[in-house]
Amino acid sequence: MIDRLAAVRKKLNEAELDALLVSQSENRRYLSGFTGSAGVLIISAENAMLATDFRYYTQAEDQAPAFDLVKVGYKFTDHLADLLTDAGAQRVGFESEHLTVAQHERWQEAASEFEWIATSGLVEDQRAVKSPQEVDKVRLAVEVADEAFARVSQQLRPGATEQDVAWMMRAEMHDLGAGGIAFETIVAAGKDGAKPHYRPANKKIPTGVPIVIDMGAAIDGYHSDMTRTIVLGAPDATFYEIYSLVLHAQEQVAAQIRAGMTCVEADAVARDIIEEAGHADHFGHGLGHGVGLAVHEAPKLSFTANEDNVLKPGMVVTIEPGVYLPDWGGVRIEDMAVVREDGLDILTRTPKAVEAQIIPAS
Ligand code: ZN
Ligand code: ZN
């Protein structure tokens, strides 16, 4: 936490800010250790304060020893001007991607003598590069997802609904020690697999169709995120064709991406292969995203990413190309990986070979 504070203070200095108010929940947790749902950090060169309400006084003292607890009740705004004066601030940064317009107006009115400066991604960029300890936590979450997936694949039988499978994943991840699921598990059979963020229905999974399963575990605040596309029974010819294309794109990404590439270049490795195969219109989402305290965080590996976003060693990202045919279904293959100087260190261990995706229907 001390290193993280030092790094954020360096950024404040570069941005000529005297103080930063951190209200975004993962940023607050990252910098302070405090996991409560409400509170604001006030960070300046000399001060580190955590202002929160009665529900969290004891928890904040336990979790955030590097921060001075400020007991503001439910009236943070009333105390704001005094706190900023104590921090010796004049130019005050706020998180413009997170703060609501209404909240911003209230803060500015209550402390109008200060200069309010919008910041964007200041802590998020820092969070994108993980420490070895953070990578270890992610690795645990990945291992739980791998093992849960293997167990559920073995139990899968005709007659199961999409919701059954989602529930089985949740139960197995819990059994394996996860604190929760990273996000609502996606189980999308047949044509519904062409909807990348489909929600599982109370619908029996037919045999022979692709089943997109996108799932992950949460452990100690860190997340995993993995997708496999399996078939119960014998797949059709389209499955073999599309699966081998997506797998090829995914493996090329794994082989070619390294630190120093831009996020747009990384995305293009997979996109070019899928476009050449005539499926340009069938891969509508980005290649991947960062994962850590949030399931979706910086960096964004996408054709829509900022041109100057570069992959750095220690970033934890997903690589998840997909091809979606509206009248048939989808195939997505998603692994998690750590970016290294010389390539990607793939964390996900669930097999990707096509034979491994076919589950006997009897
Ligand atoms: Zn996913
Ligand atoms: Zn993902």
Image (cartoon, rainbow, N blue to C red):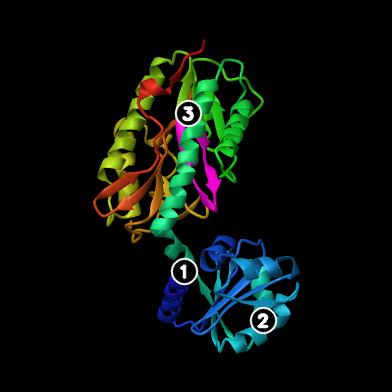
> CA separation, marks 2 and 3?
52 Å
User: x and y percent of residue 330 in the render?
Assistant: 47, 29
**In this rendering, does residue 327 appear at all?**
no
Q: Mark on residue 150?
A: 3
Q: Between 338 and 236, which is closer to the camera in this rendering? A: 338
**Disc 1 on helix, strand or loop?**
helix
User: x and y percent of residue 340 in the render?
Assistant: 29, 53
- Mark 2–mark 3 contact, CB under 8 Å? no
> CA separation, marks 1 and 2?
21 Å
Instruction: Point out the tag, 2 or 3, that comes first from the N-terminus.
Output: 2
How many numbered marks are there?
Answer: 3
Residue at the (32%, 57%) spot, across then down: 313
Identified by mark 1, the residue type is Leu
Q: Which residue is mark 2?
A: 80
Dominant SS type (magenta): strand
Image vertical order of residue 67 relative to residue 97, above or below: below
Q: Which residue is mark 1?
A: 122
Instruction: Point out the tag, 3 or 1, that comes first from the N-terminus.
Output: 1
Image vertical order of residue 325 relative to residue 181, above or below: above
Q: Residue furthest left?
A: 342
Identified by mark 3, the residue type is Ala
